[in-house]
Amino acid sequence: MDYKKILKEHTFKTWSKQKGWEPIIVTQARGVYFYDNNGKRYLDFSSQFVNVNLGYGNEKVINAIKEQLETLQYINPSFGAEIRAKAAEALLQVMPKTISKFFFSTSGTEANEAAVKISRFYKKPSYKILARYRSYHGSTEASISLTGDYRRWFVEPNTMNGVVRIPEPYCFRCPLKLKYPDCNIACANYVDYIIKQEKNVAAVIVEPITGTNGVIVPPKEYMPLLRQIAKENDILFIADEVMTGWGRTGEWFAVNIWGIEPDILTTAKGASASYVPIGITGVSKEIGEFFEDNIFAHGHTFEAHPVSLAAIPAVIEEYKRLNLLSHVKAMGEYLGKRLNDLKDRHISVGDIRGVGLFWAIELIKDSKKTPFGDYEDKYNGKLTLVDILAKKLLEKGVYVYNGPSWFIISPPLIINKEEIDQGVDAIEEVLKDADKEFL
Ligand code: PLP
């Protein structure tokens, strides 16, 4: 069978033109490596899209899923499958204390769609949702409208109304042209002004650490301040932990870094370590109680799918058994040190930032911090230098997820030092090409 031909002609390539797509045909995977149909091995240095948190081939998770498949593979969500109670109970052990009720879907996108609807039902007649420019929240109507990055341009002007943009805490390129710490966290303080001017604001949604838009770690004061502003203005605080949750930062959830508690927490990816599709919208007790007498007019056939739910308790067990939170902290320190060393040796490395096993290398092409490309390039289907370097890395057997001018380094949480060295050494090789382009 000509797999490549069929894939190209009869399946969709998403987010970029179909023409010119030359997919690598992947046939198997184990640990932190995956293999193509020629037997070539690739180190997964980004956990795909920052989601294969436990690596590949975890027997315990696979067996839990198999067992569920063999006992009850489906029941519609108006029934109460035992596994749904088990999943909720397991989640209560690891989620922030405020979160007490869960809606289960099949993706991060759906988790955020539900969060928007819940916020609007709960805060009616308020309906506006604050979201940042540098953000990605998913691909369907509400979540792509919340998304501030270039991907929303594809659907404009047909985006959902009621989205109001707020600035992001991107100190390397401050949108307010200020400098930390003299800025007094103006990007958060300004949100208070926006809420008061806009009125009818139901919620603010943020990725606690911005993910696809370049692993933007906020200064330590930002998240507690934003949380406080939301509380004082009586709007809901939604933490989109689709990417940052599940040990990625060395904590169960990134909000734990600052000790803040959201009203709504959305997650997906690491919740099943990507063995099966899952999306979770967790809400506070107060919001949960509101729906005792108010209909949550929402749902899917595949909502609370037993096979997806089976992964949740198994994955949580594995995070604990493998002691992954401390492992991530230790490996994160090592990875961070190795990446920061690159900055000293390579003129094209503008910024290294991250926490745990979640890092970005942002490249620049001159001393004015000009990026090697931007969203406009992606939108027009043009490869940036970083896209080309990512391809080169693949040729070397290392997969790294990248943005127009940055790499995202987010390996499976089970990675060891030798595997980290393999990835960083390969990146160091291709950085030499970027240095040559530096003006
Ligand atoms: N929210 C964040 C922060 C994400 O990073 C993503 C995906 O990368 C999503 C939402 C959408 O999740 P999904 O691709 O599972 O729909």
Image (cartoon, grey):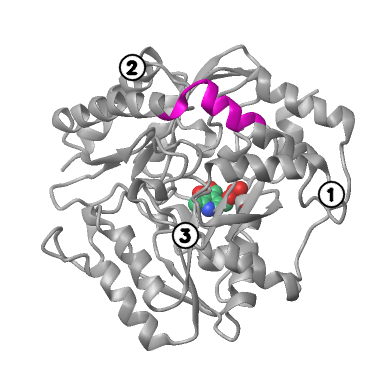
**Placement of 418 over or under 260, stated as above or below:** above
Residue picked out by circle 2: 421
Q: From which residue to which does the magenta span run?
A: 314-325
Residue type at numbered disc 1: Gly
Residue nearest the observer in this picture, 361 or 312: 312
Residue picked out by circle 3: 262
Residue 48 in percent (x, y) is at 53, 34
Q: Quadrant of the C terminus?
A: top left
Q: Secondary structure of the magenta portion, mostly?
A: helix
Residue type at numbered disc 3: Pro
Indicate left or right for 287 with 429 as reference: right
Q: Residues within 10 Å of mark 3 (few under 14, many from 20)?
A: many
Residue at left offset 45%, top offset 64% = 148
Indicate left or right for 168 with 153 as reference: left
Q: Quadrant of the N terminus?
A: top right
- How many numbered dots are placed on residues in this image? 3
Say which of marks 2 and 1 sits in front: 1
**Placement of 230 over or under 343, stated as above or below:** below
Residue at left offset 37%, top offset 64% = 227
**Placement of 186 over or under 383, stated as above or below:** below
